[in-house]
Image (cartoon, rainbow, N blue to C red):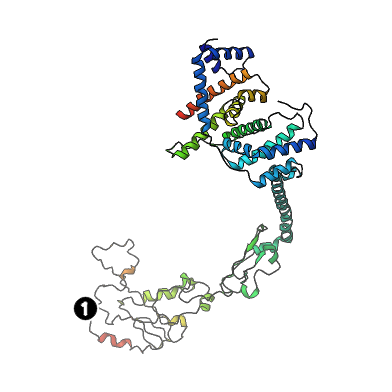
Amino acid sequence: MVVDSVPLAEAAVRERLAAWFDQYNLAIFRYLVRLIGDEEQAADLLQETFTKALVALRTQALPNNPYAWLCRIAGNLVIDMLRRKRRWSWLPFQTSTPSHEHAIATAQDVRDCLVRLNQREAELLVMAHCVGLSPSEIAELLSENVSTVRVRLHRARHRFRDLYTGESEL
Amino acid sequence: MNCAEIKTMLAQATDVAPADAAAFEQHLATCQQCNALLTELEAQTEQSFALLAQSDARPPIATVAAIHAQIMGQTKQTRFWQTRAARLLQLAAIALLVAWVGIEARNRLQTTQPLIAQLPTTPASASPAVAVVQATPTLSDVAPSATTLPIAATTTQPAVTPSQASQPTMVAKPLPSPIPVVPTSVQVQPTTMPTNPPTVPVASPPLATTIPVPTDAPVPSPEATNQLPSATAMPELSAVPTEAPAPTKETGPTRVPPSSSVPTTGSQPTASATQGLPTMPPIATTVPSQGPTETVIPGSPTPTEPSLPPLTAIGTLGPPATSTPTPTSVAPTPTDSLPPTPPPTSTPSLPTATP
């Protein structure tokens, strides 16, 4: 995953990160909007994502898949933010809603299930089903065994289904 | 590893060991049922995440420019005092400063007010006699203008002026014991009361001088009323009308003073005595020698002392005056227009009223 074992200089890191930003900012922004559902918050998280990436690149080597690496950082920020929002929000009204509002409510249910999941399980599901990474890419990104990632991914899907079914029945 | 162990492993939340993961992969390659179960589970999760609608939104240009500038280090980092927490701290500090200023100002006012309040009360406490005079204010002491002055500030003015002291309503006198003066300001209300008291009305003389005697004497003026020593000084005036109209049943002649040239017939002026006329001295009629005769009226209470003539007997029907030829008209007449009374010699010629 790591191309260079030695961190780059400050100017090189900034130039590299600026190039990645120009290349992936739109994809990461839409990825954030899909997870959060709010463009303003997605813009804020986009800035925070690259800020964290800049700090991380000062201490570690460049990743092989910068897009997956940036999406992982963004996904973790989204999960953290959803957990913070869940602490300070109330349950939505369960009324007869049209299809669009029902879809929004269901998307919110998915986000609630992601928040209820374990951090590592939610991260796997987001990378697998939102970013579209394969188990091997995830294993490479996480520096883990592919078999282990597969087993963990199956566990996460199983738990997510249980939670989502329970949320839908409510 | 069998299918049950696969399901149990999926339900567990513990970390996956590499050996268990390898056994899991090996069983999935041989077991179609477990492979189908995991495929269905992946499809359901994919459908759920498909509800998270894809967005074609674009980030704001300003945000993109800001992030790019931040990456390139062209923008200064946000200082602490520019953050939201720092602004809240600034507001809190300002609020504390304002509160401290307010408390300090109130404390200073509280410390200066007692000193101001003690200043005017010091001369009043030094001269209690003056304060006593002011403790009994009268209507004339109140100034007509509405001024807010402390009590001690008016102690130099006399409480009662000499001209006001002669008024009958001026009852303000120094009290025997001094009254403590409270160091408070008195709100003097403007009054419409005149400084001179109204004159005493004629219709309200003292109760003791009221004489229910029909008289033509002039009503004494208030000055004369006040100059009289007391109402009990003229008991004779009140006794005259009760005796004068008494029915004359006397048989003997009335005693007339020799100096009097006017014969008496029982009708004598009553108010003339108060005027002190020398020509009309009071005439006292003699009591009948036979004693008073009582007229017993059925149903009337019996007098307890028969020796005293009852007042109710006067003017009532008495026994027939057989020996009294003179009529008993005792209507009072004014002194000035009193006609000359005929001599008593003509009385026997009158017919008697006895049936």
Q: Judge from the rendering whether residue B273 lies leftward or rightward of residue A54; answer left or right.
A: left
Compared with A60, B1 (above or below) is: above
Q: Judge from the rendering whether residue B342 lies leftward or rightward of residue A133; answer left or right.
A: left
Q: Judge from the rendering whether residue A141 lies leftward or rightward of residue A103; answer left or right.
A: right
- Image-quadrant location for residue A132: top right
Q: Residue furthest top?
A: B1
Q: Nearer the viewer, residue A44 or B240?
A: A44
Q: Position of residue A30 (x, y in %)?
A: 60, 38
User: Dividing the image into 4 quarters, which one contains the N terminus of chain B?
Assistant: top right
Q: Residue furthest right?
A: A9
Mark 1 crowd level (few <14, some 14–19, many ≥20, 10 Å Cα): few
Can residue A170 be seen from the camera position used here?
A: no
Residue at 55% over, 32% down: A111
Q: Nearer the viewer, residue B3 or A37?
A: B3
Q: Nearer the viewer, residue B348 or B176?
A: B176
Residue at 67% over, 63% down: B151
Compared with B155, A146 (above or below) is: above
Residue of label 1: B354
Can residue A133 be seen from the camera position used here?
A: yes
Q: Position of residue B221 (x, y in %)?
A: 50, 79
- Image-quadrant location for residue B241: bottom left
Compared with A42, B294 (above or below) is: below
Q: What chain is tagged by disc 1?
A: B
Q: Position of residue B90 (x, y in %)?
A: 71, 46
Residue type beneath disc 1: Thr
Compared with B131, B196 (above or below) is: below
User: Dividing the image into 4 quarters, which one contains the C terminus of chain B?
Assistant: bottom left
Q: Position of residue B345 (x, y in %)?
A: 30, 87
Count of residue discs: 1
Q: Look at the numbered disc 1 and give the secondary structure of its residue.
A: loop
